[in-house]
Image (cartoon, rainbow, N blue to C red):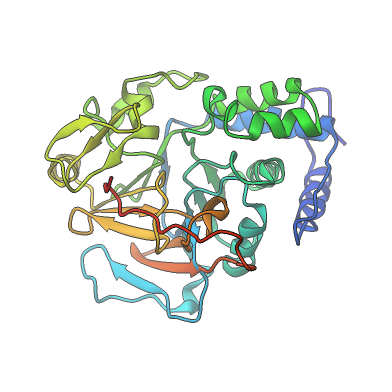
Amino acid sequence: MMTMEGNMDRGVLDDIIRRLLEGKGGKQVQLSEAEIRQLCVNARQIFISEPNLLQLRSPIRICGPILLGDGAPQKWDIADANVLVSRNDLFRVLLVFGDIHGQYQDLLRLFEFGGYPPVANYLFLGDYVDRGKQSLETICLLLAYKVRYQDRVYLLRGNHEDAKINRIYGFYDECKRRFNVRLWKIFTECFNCLPVSAVIDEKILCMHGGLSPELKQLDQINEITRPTDIPDSGLLCDLLWSDPDPRVRGWTDSDRGVSCVFGADVVAEFLQKNDLDLICRGHQVVEDGYEFFAKRRLVTIFSAPNYGGEFDNVGALLSVDESLVCSFEILKPLLVNPKVPLKKPPKVGAS
């Protein structure tokens, strides 16, 4: 049952998750408006109780674009690139996912490969909605997993978890077409409470976008007030919008027209001052699902293969085991005679 206080019992959550998982092959899953409202209310309560900067422990999985293929996973140790992780460690890891963007079928494929919660710990780097055809199924499944397994599943905010952006890029229209504008506003209230960053074992800093010229110490992240819209500038904006750029030293304005870009020197200095080993972020489509920057001190992860039906990219998933040994798994896109030639994603920082 769903109580007046907004609490959902496990039976209700398990039934919602079961129905959502039946939505394979592009099948639309139509939850009731009341069920979705309850998911948002319960998830919002959890998000606002969590710090802006989550303190996570390995093992964990970080999901971005995933490429599942015939090849062996790419693995490296933060300190020693020759240390590998075997597939037998699959269920002793923290998984990190990058952008999903409403590509619900690919999200289900990722779970089929990496295991459904709660078999592992999961960290999602944001951008759950917009552009894809099934943003509602995507965000509802993630919220349901968060409410059901709140100590196993962690969601960060992306720049598309913002009313100004998803009003334009598809989520608003999907909510309006399938339900109503009121429900979109309920999602907005939930998104405004999402944490914005995470640190794994005090060594791996994760966020959706990147660094900020205002960010000197990690404690500053917890000073951001929630609930909040995403401002047009400042620390919160940069954490969700900034990008690395190999052509830049220091900081400069971004071609996006929002936030800034930063060079490898900024990454090295920030990591040294804060005793960190790696920055893990999403926000940019990359051809191989993951791409290194700054001598492997920053990695971009993107988990939506064949992004938007336009790009010839794979998805990637980052696994972090209990010794902070990292490995990538890749997910090939399911391409069926594309009508137009697919574009190659630019390199991180390329124009």
At x 44% / y 57%, what residue is drawn?
343
At x 63% / y 35%, what residue is drawn?
170
Q: Nearer the viewer, residue 237 or 133?
A: 133
Residue 212: which quarter of the image? top left
Q: Position of residue 325 (x, y in %)?
A: 33, 66
Asked whether, in this view, residue 88 is left or right of residue 185, the answer is left
Q: Position of residue 74 (x, y in %)?
A: 37, 73
At x 50% / y 56%, what residue is drawn?
303
Q: Position of residue 101 (x, y in %)?
A: 57, 45
Residue projecting furthest to the right: 1
Q: Nearer the viewer, residue 164 or 78?
A: 164
Asked whether, in this view, residue 95 is left or right of residue 142, the answer is left
Asked whether, in this view, residue 8 is left or right of residue 90, the answer is right
At x 62% / y 62%, what residue is drawn?
111
Q: Is residue 300 visible?
A: yes
Q: Position of residue 59 (x, y in %)?
A: 44, 60
**In the rendered image, the vertical position of residue 177 relative to residue 27, given as above or below:** above
Q: Is residue 117 visible?
A: no
Q: Quadrant of the C terminus?
A: top left
Q: Quadrant of the N terminus?
A: top right
Q: How many marks?
A: 0
**In the rendered image, the vertical position of residue 180 relative to residue 101, given as above or below:** above
Q: Nearer the viewer, residue 336 or 230?
A: 336
Residue 189: which quarter of the image? top right
**In the rendered image, the vertical position of residue 37 relative to residue 293, given as above or below:** above
